Amino acid sequence: MSHIGILGTGSMLPSVVVTNEEIGRGAGVTDEWIIRKTGIRERRRAQDNQATSDLAAVAAERALRQAGVSPEEVAYIVLATSTPDQPQPPTASFVQHLIGAGNAVAFDVNAVCSGFVYALSLVERVLRTEPATERRYGLVIGADIYSRILDYSDRRTAILFGDGAGAVVLGRTAEGEVGGILATSLVSRGDQHRLIGVPAGGSRMPATADTVEQGSHFFQMDGRGVRGFVQENLPKAVHRLLADAGVGVEEVRHFVPHQANGVMLREVWPELKLVNADLQLTVELHGNTGAASVPIALDVVHRRGELAEGDNVLLSAFGGGMAIGSALVSWGRTRHARPARALQST
């Protein structure tokens, strides 16, 4: 029996490094304070001439190259982002043009930091319904440039976020081949929507001189509320997914979470009870890259050669909405990993 599996991964991190000393000056905090509160030491920042689609296109091309798939073979491009190039059209349409994937259906998904797993679940389900005889591929991308929507005097948010993009290529595995997406789970809690958001710029509060003056176009977050939400809901979502998939907690080999805050993730880690799994964290060097954080972390781990065929890899993300997305993947055969330096821009 064939499955829909991950055939290649790719990511793109801008070359500009922003240290804690630099980001801390505006927020009124120190390097030591940031590390103690978040585990983050540095993050990347897009250059002025780079938009979300530019980062996404590079990550997509790297994933396609590793998978051995041409842009013309891509049937679906789903881009998860909450920092689009512009309100319309979807940023995925720019990516489609940039990479030359003229045969693809392209659109965006916005579930904030959970968006990549939401998009992964959607594309996997669509590909699974198509005839097994057809060679069709999906390109799932998470990309965000949060540096454009931050209030750098707000220590609750300014210190956390970096810019980047990550992508995977999905396709049908060969008959009898190891690997595939075993299960996905999506959770939405609209009653908690006030915990994270950008108040202005939409139909409820259109952009005006007053909204700009008030800083209503900046990203805002209730940090304590988010921490409480994650601690209460992430373990439940993970255990429910594993139970539905018929997989025990001891069978998970890697846990790749949304890289929100390293300290918070280490606090909730014991509650997940994944006794044989490695907690994969890249937040120390990349910060929170929004919807890009799970695919970037997955690409880093994969290119380091840490994922073996048959390993159960658990992806889980949480973000504004509030939303939680999880996916259990049996790791299959991909092309040889490229050096870590391929992650950076040129």
Image (tube, rainbow, N blue to C red):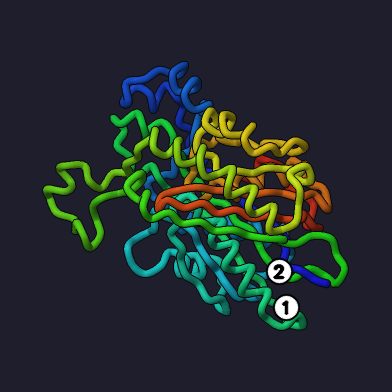
Residue at x-position 39% and y-position 37%: 225
Instruction: State the image coordinates of residue 1 (x, y, percent, origin top left).
Output: 83, 72
Crowd around label 1: few <14 · some 14–19 · many ≥20 (10 Å): few
Residue 248 placement, left or right of 268: right
Residue at x-position 66% and y-position 71%: 137
Crowd around label 2: few <14 · some 14–19 · many ≥20 (10 Å): many
Instruction: State the image coordinates of residue 164 (x, y, percent, origin top left).
Output: 51, 46
Relative vertical location of residue 151 with respect to residue 62 in this rendering, above or below: above
Instruction: State the image coordinates of residue 77 (x, y, percent, origin top left).
Output: 55, 68
Residue 284 visible in rendering: no
Check disc 1 and report its element: helix, strand or loop: loop
Location of the C terminus (image quadrant): top right
Residue at x-position 52% and y-position 55%: 142
Q: Residue furthest left?
A: 210
Q: Nearer the viewer, residue 217 or 262?
A: 262
Q: Which residue is mark 1?
A: 135
Relative vertical location of residue 179 with respect to residue 209 in this rendering, above or below: below
Q: CA distance from mark 2 to mark 1?
A: 8 Å
Residue 23 placement, left or right of 271: left
Q: Which residue is mark 2?
A: 171
Check disc 2 and report its element: helix, strand or loop: strand
Which residue type does callout 1 highlight?
Arg
Residue at x-position 39% and y-position 58%: 84
Query: Which mark is drawn over residue 253?
Result: none
Instruction: State the image coordinates of residue 53 (x, y, percent, origin top left).
Output: 46, 58
Relative vertical location of residue 136 with respect to residue 120 in this rendering, above or below: below
Q: Nearer the viewer, residue 52 or 158?
A: 158
Residue 28 image-quadrant placement: top left
Which residue type does callout 2 highlight?
Gly
Say if mark 2 contacts mark 1, CB within 8 Å.
Answer: yes
Q: Nearer the viewer, residue 134 or 11?
A: 134
